[in-house]
Structures are given as C-alpha cells and as structure tokens.
Image (cartoon, rainbow, N blue to C red):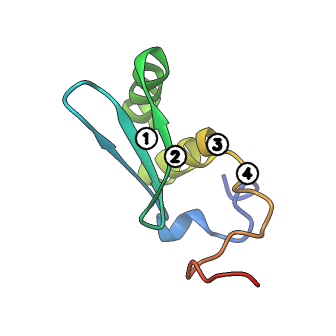
Amino acid sequence: MNNIDKRNRLGDEPFNFRVTKDNTIFLDFNGRQVKILKGSDAEKFLERINAAENTAEQQLIMAKITGNFKRGNERKNGGNSV
C-alpha cells in the first residue's frame, strides 16, 4: 500500500462512512458527503469493508470508490478557490 499512497494522505483517515437503517451508505471525505451507495453497490461496499484487514485498507477502498482522489489537488482545509 505504501506505493499507492505515496503522500500518506490516507494515514490521516480522511474518509468515513455511515449506514442507515435501509442500508444506504453515505461516504464522507473530511466531513463532507461525497458519495451515496444504495442497493447492490452498498452490499458490495460493506462486504469489502468487512473483509479489510485494517483501517488503511478501508481508507483505500473508500478512496477508490469515491474516485478522483488521487490527483493531488484535494484540499485539506476545504478552502474556496477564486
């Protein structure tokens, strides 16, 4: 995994997820909702998360599902651009 996360962004655990009663999953990046999973996508996600060996793997799974978090232009503080 060290080769995948060269800048150690996932070490800060920026991703989080919430599961509702109807198995809808909300994925958050730095406290902001970025993706919603429902149905079979939600079931596959939970299977992968439960099979992960550690939190680093869980973070990588969430990063891959949300997409576009590998380009280096993500903002840590959520500042506005001009």
* Residue kind at label 1, given as amino acid type: Glu
Q: Secondary structure at mark 1?
A: loop
Left/right of residue 59 with respect to residue 67 in the rendered view: left
Q: Quadrant of the C terminus?
A: bottom right
Q: From the top left corner, tell me how far across and down residue 29 is, in percent.
A: 50, 60
Q: Residue at x 43, y 41 (%)?
A: 53
- What is the CA distance from the residue labelled 4 to the residue labelled 2? 17 Å
- Please name which of the two marks, 3 or 1, marks the residue nearer to the observer: 3
Q: From the top left corner, tell me how far across and down residue 72 is, in percent.
A: 78, 68
Residue of label 3:
64
Q: Residue at x 56, y 82 (%)?
A: 77
Nearest the camera: 3 or 16?
16
Residue of label 1:
53
Q: Residues within 10 Å of mark 4 (few under 14, many from 20)?
A: few
Q: From the top left corner, tell me how far across and down residue 43 is, in percent.
A: 40, 20
* Residue kind at label 3, given as amino acid type: Lys
Residue 65 picture quarter: top right
Q: From the top left corner, tell me how far across and down residue 15 is, in percent.
A: 47, 57
Residue of label 2:
57
In the picture as drawn, the residue positioned furthest to the left comes out as: 21
- What is the CA distance from the residue labelled 2 to the residue labelled 1? 7 Å
- Please name which of the two marks, 2 or 1, marks the residue nearer to the observer: 2
Kindly check if marks 2 and 1 are in contact, taking CB atoms under 8 A apart as contact: yes
Residue of label 4:
68
